[in-house]
Every structure is written in structure tokens, then in C-alpha cells.
Image: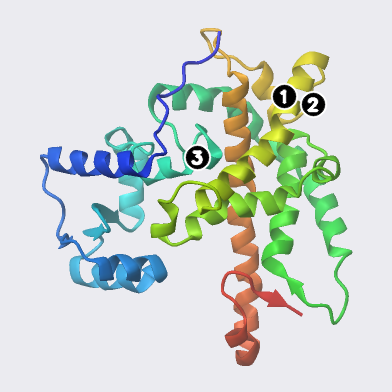
Amino acid sequence: MALVGPEPISFNPCRRLTSDLLAERRTEVPFPPGETSFSLSRTRQFADYPLPVLLEAYERFGPVFTMRIFHGNTVWMLGPEANHYMTVSHASNFSWRDGHMGDLAPFLGDGLLTIDGDFHRRSRRIMLPAFHHEAIAAALGTMNLEIDRALQEWHRGQRIDVYHWTRRLALRIAMRSLFGFDPDASVARIDAARRFEQGLGFWSRDYFLQVLRGPGTPFAQMQSARRALDEVIFPEITRRRASGERGPDLLSLLIDASDEDGEALNDQQIRDEVMTLLFAGHDTTTSTVAFMCYEPACGTSSTACSAASARTPECS
């Protein structure tokens, strides 16, 4: 018997906007101090370069403040105490799915990042053994092999786009160690790293472009990337169910696992967790390694630093 998942999220921007406005009108608790009036200029500044906008609000209102971005008020809580309040001591007061984390659902689906409540807790219990110390230690061999393989491509005098190089490396490691995928066999059909970047790139587009639907829009391109990645994930789930092949990886665990009530994940739920963990397993690592190379380059060569992109730094 499969776990009962959450209600589907509407991807219609008009419905989401209306839902946000109605939820704000029903709010009985006052918002923290801040900039709560509608401002198209503030929305544009936040979309183009959010950090100065947030730092100015932090200086004016402190670590908890409200800021209206486009149509809705957003409450910002900064600092370790706020993180503990939201994720540990008072986590039941918050819904990730009803907030901005739910915006990831069109690409990732209903994985751990976009679900709440009992379904979230049961899914975590099913997946927990894959993240025990022994399982993580066993993945080190795969990590070292992939790192050595990737570094063989580097040559003196060569210009390397570190951001894209790291994304492909981290995604290969995640595909092999978490799910037992053969990256070379999968990439023979699609460029998984490029498709992930295409899908995640939707959220870096102008907000006013994100609400568009139809052929050629950023949303359509993101959905195209999702379909291409699904063409790798779903056949692998089907193949393993039919053959009984299993390995020391998370995908094998997800296929066979069930909770104390005998409920298991169906193919769609497994796919959503695979996508979520592939995202979590490579995206932050990509940014961290890229900036790790970017910062020393800034310290040693101001000319190189001014010419480099903060998102895709290059190392020579």
C-alpha cells in the first residue's frame, strides 16, 4: 500500500497569486515592522540584486522584518535563533509547501523539500538508513574516483569554467553514490547536468517572465528539462522492480522500504525523492566549490576578479 501524498499544488500563477492575497487578508496576527506597501521599484530591485535591499531592511528593522515583494508580504527572519525557531523549536507553526519552497514542486515534485506533516515524517523515516555513517563512508570511494577522473581533464594554461565543471562532477557523484546510476549510460541519452541547470534556471529568470505559460516560456523550458530527466529515472525504477536488481544505494532502498504500517512509496513518490536528493546532493556543492575558487582569484588578481562572473567564475 502506497503512502498517501499531499494535495497537488496548482502551477497556475493567477491561482497562486489569488491564494496568497486571500491568505494575507485572513491573517489575524500583525506582520512585523517593515516595508509593507506595494512598490514595483522595490520588487524590481529585489529581483535584480536582493542583497542590498535585505541589508538595508536589516539595518532599519532588525533581524525580523516584513517586506512586500510584488503582491505579497514576506517575513524575513535572519540569524541562528530564527533558524532554530523555524526548523526545530516551532517547526509545526510553518508550512514549507504553502510558502516559497512549494515553488520548487513544478520541477522537483513532492520530495522532502516541498512536503509537510505526516507524509514528510514517514518519508524521512523510510530514507534515514541511507544516510547512516556507514552508508556515507562507503560513498567516499566513489567520490574519490570521480574527483580523480574529473581532474585528469585539467591541463596547465587551460581555462576552466569551474561552476559548470563542478556541477557535472557533483551530479555524477550524486547519481552514482545515491542512486547507483551509470552517469555515462545516462548522459549518452541526455546531458543530465545541463538539464538540471536548465530546470533550475527557471528561478533565476525575471519574476515577470516566470508567470508566463505556453510554448517558449521559461516555464515550458523547465518542464522540458523535467521530462528529459524523467526519461532516465522512471525507466530505471521500472527496470529494478522487474529484475529485482538492488544495490547499496538510496534508490534500491526507496523501492523496497516501507514504514511500520507497511506503506511504501509509489513510483511517482520515488521519482520525486530522487529528483530532490539529486538537487540537494549537487547544487549547493557546486556553488560552494565555485566560490571557493573565486575568492582566492579575487585576492590575487583584481583584473581577473573584475572580469569574472560571480556565478560562473573561471580559473586558469
Q: How many marks?
A: 3
**Residue at (57%, 25%) from the top-left corner?**
269
**Corner quadrant of residue 38:** bottom left
Q: Could you tell me how far apart the alpha carbons at marks 3 and 2 are, in whole angstroms?
A: 29 Å
Disc 3 or 2, which lies upstream in sequence?
Answer: 3
Q: Position of residue 145 (x, y in %)?
A: 85, 50
Disc ID at residue 106: 3
Asked if the residues shown at circle 1 and circle 3 are in contact, with their CB atoms under 8 angstroms apart, the answer is no
Q: Nearer the viewer, mark 2 or mark 1?
A: 1
Amino acid, disc 2? Gly
Q: Residues within 10 Å of mark 1 (few under 14, many from 20)?
A: some
Disc ID at residue 237: 1
Disc 2 or 1, which lies upstream in sequence?
Answer: 1
Frontmost residue, 136 versus 221: 221
Amino acid, disc 3? Pro
18 sits to left or right of 151: left
Amino acid, disc 1? Ile
270 sits to left or right of 159: left
Seen in the picture, residue 142 relative to 201 is either above or below; the reply is above
Q: Position of residue 177 (x, y in %)?
A: 75, 39
